[in-house]
Image (cartoon, rainbow, N blue to C red):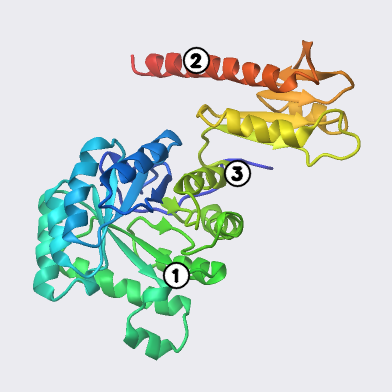
Amino acid sequence: MYNKLSIKRRKSTRIYVGNVPIGDGAPITVQSMTNTRTTDVIATINQIKSLEKVGVDIVRVSVPTIDAANALKLIKQQVKVPIIADIHFDYRIALKVAEYGVDCLRINPGNIGNKERIRQVVDCVRDKNIPIRIGVNGGSLEKDIQKKYKKLTPLALVESTMRHVDILEKLNFEQFKISVKSSDVFLTVAAYRLLANKIDQPLHLGITEAGGARSGSVKSAIGLGILLSEGIGDTLRVSLAADPIEEVKVGFDILKSLHIRSRGINFIACPSCSRQEFDVISIVNALEERLKDIITHMDVSIIGCIVNGPGEAQTSTIGVTGAKINSGFYEDGIRQKERLNNIYMLDQLEAKIRAKALILDKNKKIKIKQLNK
């Protein structure tokens, strides 16, 4: 029998990035990364606040210099979402951002210097209760591993990962999560499958350098969808050569499609054909733009004719079934006496959806209040 809750999550340990739990059954979080220059404090703050508005759980910021670290201190004071500092090579930057109260470090212990420097960083984050993300990418493997395997393979990625894990474990530091990414979907999937059986720490999912908005979204949906459907993954980022806001939207769409986590409106719409009684495509595109501020989860079906319209509407929060002049309107699966005029449908439907969102939000708050009594 079909079961929306059939995905069994891989068991993992729990860490916290700021106040956001990762692993051990916590909700799978959606991350993104700023693409502004970190030293441009205002631009970076504005981008992070835009990401907060679309629901991002965690934001990563590149910190390549001490000047960027100093800028991050100012940025951190102006935003609410937890911040991960992305650092390579220079252990002094890691120490500096830890002092400034960053919520997590993205480093590879093996590339920030000798054992003493690594120990200094680990001791510092341990003292401040800051977790680490080990991030291994196919494009930056150690030279000896490249020489050993000749080409990029899942085993090569995992061997590199376990080197960094071994460093932290020898220092008795276990508050870390791991990513093991490639731009190749199936290579990445195979590497995560291998890694999932080797460690207990949370896994950060992603297809690195996935591409532009369209192709990158497709690759990420396939790769992350495979892993998440197998219960692998505790947090994710959709890496796109596009506005970071799109990364967050696609990330939530992937989780929503797998019935793992719901946020915002799930539009169910026909691709349209000559049977449509109104312009489905323009209505859906306009509603997605107008209602992007709605974070309440609901299913909205917009079908242009009566072939599939009633069936979809009966399983939706709000539904429209195309008919000449005035189309059928459904709420909570029940057909209403009221009909929507095809000419004015866009405005009418927007108003209906917003009103429903307010009701759902109010009911949710009442339930939470009752549970907390």
- Label of residue 363 in the image: 2
Percent across and percent down for residue 249 are 52, 43
- Look at the numbered disc 2 and give the secondary structure of its residue: helix
Q: Is residue 99 above or below residue 150?
A: above
Disc nearer the start of the sequence (1/3): 1
Task: Please tell me how crowded label 3 is: few (under 14), some (14-19), or many (20+) other residues with Cα within 10 Å.
Answer: few
- Label of residue 287 in the image: none
Query: Do labels 1 and 3 touch, CB within 8 Å?
Result: no
Residue found 72% across the figure and 24% down from its top: 319
- Report which residue position mark 1 lands on: 194
- Look at the numbered disc 1 and give the secondary structure of its residue: helix
Q: Quadrant of residue 217?
A: bottom right
- Report which residue position mark 3 lands on: 257
Disc nearer the start of the sequence (2/3): 3
**120 vs 171, nearest the viewer:** 120
Q: Amino acid at mark 3?
A: Ser
Name the quarter where the C terminus is drawn.
Answer: top left
Query: Do labels 2 and 1 touch, CB within 8 Å?
Result: no
**Measured Cα–Cα span from mark 2 to mark 3:** 24 Å
Residue found 28% across the figure and 75% down from its top: 163
Task: Please tell me how crowded label 1 is: few (under 14), some (14-19), or many (20+) other residues with Cα within 10 Å.
Answer: some
Percent across and percent down for residue 156 are 41, 79
